């Protein structure tokens, strides 16, 4: 069974600074995907970034980058130049790529980020 | 990117009643997924909805409690039946577009009194 671990329940970060959110995973699958989502207080899940297990380069999307270390089974999210609007819950998720079952996600417990002005 | 819309966005329900949540995707998708997020918790998959076949439920979730319909490739519904306060959660649908693109609806926040 897949397992996703986010060890930081909450973090404070100063506006304009960078922050790293930890995510480790456990799987015996060779092919998988890793996602990060942002969930503001409104409850919607906002897709941030994706990394495939066979991607050799770390994914980047604007101020978001994913530090993918396959051997260590970690997929940390780095948010650069934090903004007040980045205050939210952040979830790491792993995607099983099982053709018959579809690409369902297993989520970590989440990290709450609060950006201080 | 696809737009996934859910309704209702929130509702307050009485114990013992049922509520149906709708999820509409603006493009055809093979798989749709329903998740539950209990207060202060992470997301847990309820079931996978495939068009033209019965939904596949995860351990701990049963069809009698969470019946799902998937009448076409752009639409699905989840019903929360015979609700109790423990069913108070955010319910989210997501659609499987292609590798690296798995988006969510805005969520339906249910409060059961």
Image (cartoon, coloured by chain):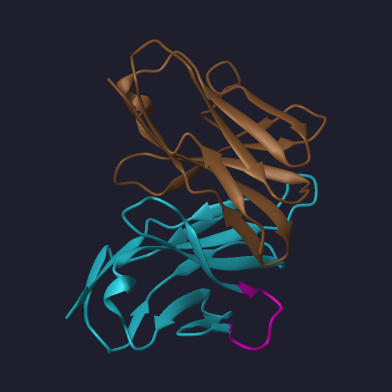
Q: Position of residue B101 (x, y in %)?
A: 66, 63
Seen in the image, is B83 located left or right of residue B111?
Answer: right
Q: Magenta region's main secondary structure?
A: loop
Q: Position of residue B43 (x, y in %)?
A: 45, 47
At horizontal 32% and vertical 64% (from top left) the residue drawn is A88
Classify residue B109 by image quadrant.
top left
Seen in the image, is B105 located left or right of residue A23?
Answer: right
Classify residue A29 by image quadrant.
bottom right
Decide which of B69, A2 is in the foreground and name it: B69
Q: What stretch is highlighted in magenta?
A: A51-59
Q: Where is residue A86 in the image (x, y as percent from the top left)?
A: 33, 72
Looking at the image, residue A23 lies above or below residue B89: below
Q: Considering the image in quadrants, where does the C terminus of chain A appear?
A: bottom left
Looking at the image, residue B98 lies above or below residue B39: below
At horizontal 83% and vertical 30% (from top left) the residue drawn is B52
Looking at the image, residue B57 lies above or below residue B1: above
Seen in the image, is B41 located left or right of residue B49?
Answer: left
Chain A's colour is cyan
């Amino acid at each position: 069974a897949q397992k996703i671990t986010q060890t930081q329940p909450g973090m404070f970060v100063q506006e304009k600074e960078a922050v790293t959110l930890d995510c480790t995973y456990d799987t015996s699958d060779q092919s998988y995907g890793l996602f990060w989502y942002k969930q503001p207080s409104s409850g919607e899940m906002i897709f941030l970034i994706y990394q495939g297990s066979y991607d050799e380069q770390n994914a980047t999307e604007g101020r978001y980058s994913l530090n993918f270390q396959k051997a260590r089974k970690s997929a940390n999210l780095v948010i650069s130049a934090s903004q007040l609007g980045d205050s939210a819950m952040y979830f790491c998720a792993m995607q099983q790529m099982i053709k018959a079952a579809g690409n369902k996600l297993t989520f970590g417990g989440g990290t709450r980020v609060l950006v201080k002005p | 990117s696809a737009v996934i819309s859910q309704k209702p966005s929130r509702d307050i329900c009485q114990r013992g009643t049922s509520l149906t949540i709708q999820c509409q995707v603006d493009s055809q998708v093979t798989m749709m997924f329903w998740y539950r997020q209990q207060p202060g918790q992470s997301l847990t998959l309820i079931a996978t909805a495939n068009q033209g076949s019965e939904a596949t439920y995860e351990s701990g979730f049963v069809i009698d409690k969470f019946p799902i319909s998937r009448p076409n490739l752009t639409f699905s519904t989840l019903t929360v039946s015979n609700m109790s306060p423990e069913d108070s959660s955010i319910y989210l649908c997501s659609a499987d577009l292609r590798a690296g693109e798995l988006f969510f609806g805005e969520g339906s926040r249910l409060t059961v009194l």
